[in-house]
């Protein structure tokens, strides 16, 4: 790994008082934290770039070992060379990379930071000159082969299935024609010509840009649009977030940054864009026309087939002189796209259940990520003794925040690691009676999933209470002290390195008496024969085999 020279030429007014990192500074921080690979070898953006990064999600590499990949020597299948670098995974290849972007020193602080920002938005600061407009290309400068969008090193995400190179790490800005309130969302965009993009807005998730598009359509006016690529990470994190309609993402980004985000007027459309962005594609959408878009490998893990989508006609491309572009690796999860969502969705659901619905005993919300993409399986963890009514309120309450999150919602106890599928299955196996502890909820949104020509009907959800309904016998593993001692012994014997998997020691689950505990501990000291006489005294005739000793009154035991 070599040092990255970020070459920040940001001498505009926006530097003063800025309290958040731009992409160049973020890359420097990733490098300093050992979270960056710099690839100087020539890499084909059409066939090699995303498959290379994909291996760190499908190659048995642990999340903590994932890195962002900075490509400095990009070529394409036509033999063209690009002088602009591209970084993949810079926002959220792992929780740690996201943490660096959030500027906090531990992953645990990400959730509280989101909660604080949502309730403490900060109004943007308007500037008149900006790094993202150091170079402005418009009109004839954009047209012709190799110009405009074609001059950018945009990769093909899923070679062999995608119809074209796609912008994936966008922050798409539109505004409400009635109120002027801007929305920012991450939507993919297909390269179609040097000045034309196809852009997908998913009706099922009702993105803010779609709501604006409908209003422009009703007014019979074309919709101004900006696709921002390479935002300061603190701004980029807002792109995939679903905020209430009318809430300005840039103000929440200001809340995350702890100060205003600098915004500058776009050069050819009436919109404001983040001043320290790397590149901005400005243009218009004619809401009367749609064009085929796709196929494209989607974040639910299947290929989205060709559908009619909006068309962006580009009016200008503005950029930094030393722009670095960003691409998000999505498709089959885990992916950068799922990490970026998980780290904000989980705290949002926790806030919803604990603070808005005032659920007692809720400890944690965990969304299952590998292959299932967060939305389908949600696990709720509860403190011991949480009333059954609160568990059911939380199970139903999980269905209320977003239309398509929560297909299987499973409540577990505090000793169950919600991130371990094995542990969750274990809870379902022994702590749940399907006939009593599950409910089916009808008329749920089908949500984000593979689509064919079949009309999307309603889906349903299954709620599962897999918490203990009564005290249970202890977990049958040696007590903690014996396992810890044995671990030290294991290491002294120089046996292969251990990676403890919970549960790795036994503990009481309530149905355990002092008497049994004493007997077991006596046995560990070699005193197991001490009980011999008491067993003999409790001997009796006429009991059925397997009768629990506790059901035989002591006075009857002869
Ligand atoms: C990498 C990535 C790509 C995405 N692509 C799209 C897309 O093409 N279309 C879409 O409607 N939503 C897409 N999403 C989800 C939206 O960003 C998400 O629904 C967000 O809430 C939209 O913001 P909005 O509701 O403010 O418009 C994508 C999310 C990520 C992380």
Image (spheres, rainbow, N blue to C red):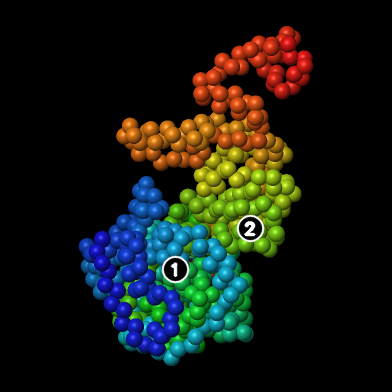
Image quadrant in which the C terminus is located: top right
Say how many tags the image has.
2
- Label 2 beta carbon less than 8 Å to ligand 1: no
Instruction: Report the residue at 27% width, 69% height from top.
Output: 4
Left or right: where 44 falls relative to 447 = left
Instruction: Decide which of tag 2 and tag 1 comes sooner along the chain.
Output: 1
Task: Please say if 66 is above or below 253.
Answer: above
Q: Which residue is labeled 2 in the image?
A: 445
Q: Which residue is labeled 1 in the image?
A: 103
Task: Please say if 453 is above or below 138.
Answer: above
Instruction: Report the residue at 28% width, 66% height from top.
Output: 71
Helix, strand or loop at disc 1? loop
Instruction: Determine crowd level at label 2: few under 14, some 14-19, many 20+ residues with C-alpha closer than 10 A.
Output: many
Helix, strand or loop at disc 2? loop
Q: Position of residue 51 (x, y in %)?
A: 33, 56
Task: Please say if 167 is above or below 499.
Answer: below
Of the pair 29 and 63, the residue shown nearer to us: 29
Q: Position of residue 271 (x, y in %)?
A: 50, 85
Q: Position of residue 35 (x, y in %)?
A: 34, 61
Q: Where on the picture, by quarter, is residue 158?
A: bottom left
Instruction: Report the residue at 35% width, 76% height from top.
Output: 149
**Residue 240 in view (yes/no):** yes
Instruction: Report the residue at 40% width, 74% height from top.
Output: 21
**Residue 184 in view (yes/no):** no
Q: Position of residue 552 (x, y in %)?
A: 75, 19
Q: CA distance from mark 2 to mark 1?
A: 36 Å
């Amino acid at each position: 790994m070599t040092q990255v020279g970020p070459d920040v030429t940001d001498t505009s007014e926006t530097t003063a008082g800025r309290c958040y990192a731009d992409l160049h500074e973020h890359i420097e921080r990733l490098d300093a934290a050992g979270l960056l690979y710099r690839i100087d070898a020539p890499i084909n953006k059409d066939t090699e770039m995303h498959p290379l990064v994909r291996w760190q999600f499908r190659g048995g590499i642990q999340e903590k070992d994932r890195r962002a990949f900075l490509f400095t020597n990009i070529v394409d299948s036509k033999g063209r060379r690009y002088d602009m670098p591209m970084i993949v995974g810079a926002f959220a290849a792992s929780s740690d990379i996201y943490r660096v972007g959030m500027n906090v020193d531990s992953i645990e602080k990400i959730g509280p930071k989101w909660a604080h920002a949502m309730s403490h938005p900060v109004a943007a600061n308007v500037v008149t000159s900006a790094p993202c407009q150091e170079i402005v290309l418009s009109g004839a400068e954009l047209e012709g082969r190799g110009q405009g969008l074609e001059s950018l090193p945009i990769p093909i995400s899923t070679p062999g299935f995608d119809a074209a190179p796609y912008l994936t790490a966008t922050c798409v800005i539109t505004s409400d024609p009635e109120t002027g309130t801007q929305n920012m969302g991450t939507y993919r965009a297909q390269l179609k010509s040097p000045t034309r993009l196809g852009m997908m807005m998913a009706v099922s998730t009702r993105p803010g840009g779609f709501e604006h598009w409908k209003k422009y359509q009703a007014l019979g006016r074309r919709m101004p649009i900006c696709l921002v690529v390479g935002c300061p990470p603190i701004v980029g994190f807002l792109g995939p977030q679903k905020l209430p309609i009318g809430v300005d993402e840039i103000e929440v980004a200001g809340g995350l940054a702890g100060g205003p985000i600098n915004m500058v007027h776009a050069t050819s459309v009436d919109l404001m864009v983040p001043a320290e962005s790397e590149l901005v594609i400005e243009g218009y959408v004619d809401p009367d026309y749609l064009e085929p878009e796709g196929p494209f490998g989607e974040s639910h893990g299947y290929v989205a087939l060709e559908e009619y989508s909006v068309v962006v006609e580009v009016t200008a491309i503005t950029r930094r002189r030393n722009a670095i572009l960003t691409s998000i690796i999505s498709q089959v999860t885990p992916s950068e796209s799922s990490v970026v969502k998980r780290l904000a969705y989980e705290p949002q659901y926790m806030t919803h259940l604990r603070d808005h619905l005032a659920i007692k005993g809720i400890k944690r919300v965990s969304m299952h990520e590998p292959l299932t993409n967060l939305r389908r399986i949600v696990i709720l963890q509860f403190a011991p003794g949480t009333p059954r009514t609160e568990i059911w309120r939380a199970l139903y309450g999980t269905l209320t925040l977003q239309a398509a999150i929560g297909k299987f919602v499973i409540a577990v106890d505090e000793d169950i690691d919600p991130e371990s599928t094995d542990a969750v299955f274990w809870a379902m196996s022994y702590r749940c009676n399907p006939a009593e502890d599950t409910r089916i909820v009808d008329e749920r949104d089908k949500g984000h999933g593979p689509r064919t020509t079949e009309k999307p009907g309603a889906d349903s959800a299954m709620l599962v209470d897999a918490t203990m309904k009564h005290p249970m016998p202890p977990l049958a593993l040696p007590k903690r002290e014996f396992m810890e001692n044995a671990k030290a012994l294991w290491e002294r014997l120089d046996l292969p390195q251990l990676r403890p998997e919970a549960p790795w020691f036994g503990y009481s689950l309530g149905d355990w008496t002092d008497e049994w505990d004493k007997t077991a501990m006596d046995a560990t000291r070699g005193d197991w024969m001490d009980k011999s006489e008491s067993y003999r005294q409790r001997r009796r005739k006429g009991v059925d085999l397997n009768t629990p000793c506790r059901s035989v009154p002591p006075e009857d035991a002869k």
